Amino acid sequence: MKEKLLEGYFDKRFAMPELQLVDERELMDDREYMIQLYPAKARLIMVMVEDECDKLEYEGSPMFAPYPDKETVLGISRRIFYKVCCDRTDEHLKQMIDVMLCDEFFVRRSRYMRRRKFFM
């Protein structure tokens, strides 16, 4: 009896990754919907963040480094901040851009790592 319980446990345990597969398009659609709920200024900033990340989406990019350099990330954030803001002292906006950029890096790095597993 105990062997059957353990057998069922291991079957479920090893079958779990198949259950965790989620359609990437579905995740991206959900993310895009959530971004539409952002306030107008945050959506504008998100477009700029996505544009900057689009420029970094190449093999060997600092975005895909195992440990991205903090100064590089802050430099990208600063560039976006200067495009968006006339008031150079708005620290809250600067921090929001930092967070949005790091989140976008995370999303793209996750997608990159998932896809690399299939093509390597």
Image (cartoon, helix red, strand yellow):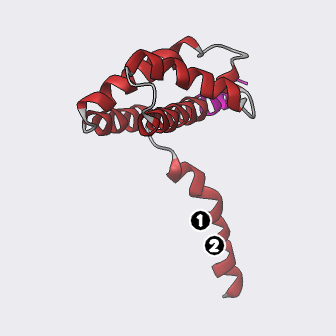
Between 27 and 5, the residue placed more toward the observer is 27
Closer to the camera, 83 or 1? 83
**Residue 48 image point, x, y percent:** 41, 19
Is 63 left, or right, of 35 in this rendering?
Answer: right
Q: Where does the C terminus fall, quadrant-wise? A: top right
Name the residue rendered at 66%, 88% in the picture. 1
Q: Give the range drawn in magenta.
A: 112-120
In the rendered structure, does residue 108 fall within the stretch colored magenta? no
Q: Is label 2 in a helix, a strand or a loop? A: helix
The residue that appears at 61% across and 22% down in the rendered structure is 75
Which residue is tagged 2? 9
Tag 1, which secondary structure? Answer: helix
Main secondary structure type of the part rendered in magenta: helix
Disc number for residue 32: none
The amino acid on which the numbered mark 2 sits, given as a three-letter code, is Tyr
In front: 1, or 85? Answer: 85
